[in-house]
Image (cartoon, coloured by chain):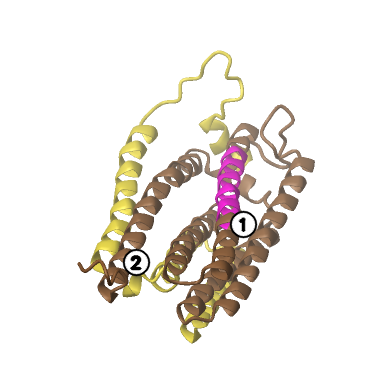
Amino acid sequence: MKRLIEVWLGLMLLLAISTFSALLPLGILNTILNVAIAVAKSLLVLMYFMQLRRSIALLRLVAMVSLLTLTLFFVLAGADFITRTIERAPWQAAQPSVAEDYSPAAR
Amino acid sequence: MDAATPDSAQDIGRQAARTRLGMWAFLGSEVMFFGPVFFAYLYGRFMWPQAFEAASRGTDLLCGAVNTAVLLTSSLGVAVAHLLADRGAYGRARRALDAVVLLGLAFLAIKGYEYVQDWREQLVPGPHFHLQGAVNQAGAQLFYFVYFFATALHALHLTAGIALMLHCRRALRRRPGRPTLRRLEAAGLYWHFVDIVWIFLFPALYLAGRAL
């Protein structure tokens, strides 16, 4: 019980750090911190609340396999999407343009 | 195996292992279910970074942070309920589940309040969508499409989780024992998974581009 509450305190601390650090202009570090803290929080939940820490290797393997498969999908689909030019259909007037986003006015 | 002793320690261990493995396999399929939503977000963030960051600033940071705290606390409640039930303290385990259900409902209430605010601020994708101060309105609209889809899908999962917790609470009262304990553990794994999805949704939807 004590351990669970300690983990919860850790989660709250991480939440506070991620929320307040997001308000500081740290550039790219903002994104890195956000992702790193989210990963740390999920590891705490996975290890202690979902008890992967005490689980047999098979369960950890199942958990890892789904994440690895998802990573694979992200890489494959991502390689396709970011190298593709968006073709605008005639009726798609609202298609967001990339150029607009990078214009000086958007900055 | 001797039919006269169906509840041997080995048998109990096997049944528990089966439950866990089944639930983890199901959660694997759930990862595949939520994955594309995150992919859509990443793609949009990569293609229209300014629009996505401007749109992210339009969300309610306080509501998002409070909801994250509510959900993390509810996860603690589920873990505590399972621990108490495992020790035979079924009454106290039910109290813990009460707290979990209330926290889950509080999360949905705060999310609902946010949806009402979004509706009033014309942030719902459609002909009336308008985000103040955003140059690329179409890009910002895409962010809100992902925002509504992701949070609604998450809220749907949370609703299912609340139903599971109510079911477990009733089972703890009516027929406390090993099968109920296994059920509670499986439902708990599901609850924690939904929590983890939110752990990633929170920085993606609420914290992106917050610092100016």
Q: N-terminal of the two: label 2 or label 1?
A: 2
Q: Which chain is yellow?
A: A
Name which residue type carries label 2. Answer: Ala
Residue A24 visible in rendering: no
Q: Is residue B69 above or below residue A98?
A: below
Q: Find the residue positioned furthest to the left.
A: B1
Q: Which residue is mark 1?
A: B210
Q: Colour of chain B?
A: brown
Horizontal side of residue B58 vs A41, given as left or right: right
Q: Is residue B203 above or below residue A103?
A: below
Q: Secondary structure at mark 2?
A: helix
Residue B47 visible in rendering: yes
Specify few, some or many for label 2: CA neighbours under 10 Å numbering under 14, 14-19, or 20 or more: some
Q: From the top left corner, tell me how far across and down residue B56 is, in percent.
A: 62, 49
Q: In which quadrant of the rendered view does residue A47 lie? A: bottom left
Q: Within the magenta stretch, is there residue B103?
A: no
Residue at figure coordinates x 38%, y 28% from the top left: A84
Image quadrant in which the C terminus of chain B is located:
bottom right
Q: Which label is found at residue B16? A: 2
Residues drawn in magenta? B143-161
Q: Is residue B73 above or below residue B125?
A: below
The residue nearer to you, when weighing B136 against B118, is B118
